[in-house]
Image (tube, grey):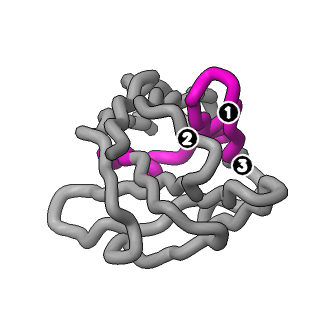
Amino acid sequence: QVQLVESGGGLVQAGASLRLSCAASGRTFSRYSMGWFRQAPGTEREFVAGISWIGGKTSYADSVKGRFTISRENAKNTLYLQMNSLKPEDTAVYYCAAFNGGTIYSSPSQYDYWGQGTQVTVSS
């Protein structure tokens, strides 16, 4: 069982940066591949970035490539999402998710554990 708690969201202007954190419980965090997803009102939850537990392989949605960076610190059971050059279209609730596996999936259905989400609002 893994419990996830996100933090770091807020209201910022376009062009600003934010860093989201996801604190995970459990002693096997390093065995879980992790992902960040987001959901804006009236839309489906979409993949933002993922990181595997083996070798730290990463994957990004095209819309955030070059602006967002996913990383993890297994010693602290923490996942991060550094978001730079934020745009109004990045406004959404951001969720971290985990599954016990070695690859990266972009489909939310592949993930077993979810946090409660943190709101990110980018004003123009």
Please, what is the three-letter code of the amino acid marked with disc 2?
Phe
For disc 3, the neighbor class at 10 Å (few under 14, some 14 to 19, many from 20) is: few
Query: Spatial distance from mark 2 to mark 3, Cα to Cα?
Result: 26 Å
Task: Place residue 17 in its image quadrant.
Answer: top right
Residue drawn at x 54%, y 41% is 28
Looking at this view, name the residue that lies furthest to the front: 27
The picture places residue 47, in percent across and down from the top left corner, at 47, 67
Residue with the mark numbered 1: 74
Q: Which residue is mark 3?
A: 67
Q: Amino acid at mark 1?
A: Asn
In x, y percent, where is residue 109?
32, 76
Considering only vertical position in the picture, is 35 above or below 111? above
Identified by mark 3, the residue type is Arg
Mark before the other along the chain sequence, 1 or 3: 3
Q: Are marks 2 and 1 in contact (CB under 8 Å)?
A: yes
Magenta-colored stretch includes residue 80: yes
Question: Disc 2 or disc 3, which is closer to the eye?
Answer: 2
Q: Are marks 1 and 3 in contact (CB under 8 Å)?
A: no
Answer left or right for 83 relative to 58: left
Q: Who comes first in sequence, dot 2 or dot 1? A: 2
Q: Counting other residues with Cα less than 10 Å from the Cα at mark 2, is it few (<14), some (14-19), or many (20 or more)?
A: many
In the image, residue 115 sits, relative to residue 37, either above or below, namely above
At 67% from the left and 46% from the top, the residue drawn is 70
Which label's residue is closer to the chain start, 2 or 3? Answer: 2
Helix, strand or loop at label 1? It is helix
Query: Residue 79 versus residue 119: which sits nearer the camera?
Result: 79
The stretch in magenta equals 70-95
Identity of the residue drawn at 44% across and 33% down:
26
| Pointer 2 residue | 29
Q: Secondary structure at mark 2?
A: helix
